[in-house]
Image (spheres, grey):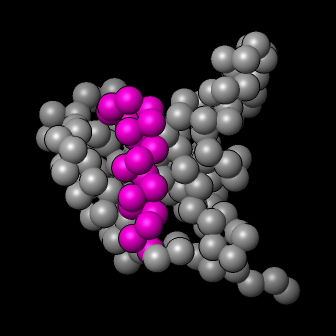
Amino acid sequence: MQTKPILTLDDAKKIAAAAEAEAKANNWAVTISIVDDGGHLLWLQRLDNAAPVSASIAPAKAKTAAIGRRETKVYEDMINNGRYSFITAPVIEGMLEGGVPIVVEGQCIGAVGVSGVKSSEDVQIARAGIAALGL
């Protein structure tokens, strides 16, 4: 039987705190979502003044990054480069930049999705959160 690392609630709290700090340092109102490797929600945090829709978009980005095992920018680029039929892929939502997988020892253990500012800034926040794990 194989073994793999898992994302714990303590890990999610560390990620969330670091992501929140990055967002607040830049005065960005966002929603931060953290999911496990199956895309199941572990954490959702909507900062003050974040748009209500961001509370739906952030978890969708996180889930897509986790189950797809790649950053959601890959899907956005694929569609923007003409593969429009990909938007009909089943189960996959949130195909917008801002979802980042959490990879430990070559295994995806979850993902962070952020929504509320420019996509590249969403990614900056997600990566800052993941960096708190010291990977």
Q: Considering depth in this image, is 79 or 94 the residue closer to the camera?
A: 79
Looking at the image, residue 83 sits to the left or right of residue 113; the answer is right
Q: Is 120 covered by the magenta stretch?
A: yes
Q: Residue at x 32, y 56 (%)?
A: 19
Q: Is residue 119 visible?
A: yes
Position above or below: 124 against 51: below
Residues in magenta, as a range: 115-133
Q: Considering depth in this image, is 31 or 1 the residue closer to the camera?
A: 31
Q: Is residue 40 visible?
A: no
Question: Among all residues in the image, which is located at the extreme right?
Answer: 1
Q: Residue at x 57, y 62 (%)?
A: 102
Dividing the picture into quarters, in which one does residue 108 lie? bottom right
Dividing the picture into quarters, in which one does residue 73 lie? top right
Q: Residue at x 44, y 74 (%)?
A: 133
Q: Considering depth in this image, is 36 or 112 the residue closer to the camera?
A: 112
Quadrant housing the N terminus:
bottom right
| Magenta-colored segment: predominant secondary structure | helix
On the image, the x and y values in percent for residue 8 come to 47, 76
On the image, the x and y values in percent for residue 131 come to 44, 67
Looking at the image, residue 84 sits to the left or right of residue 72; the answer is right
**Count the marks: how many?**
0
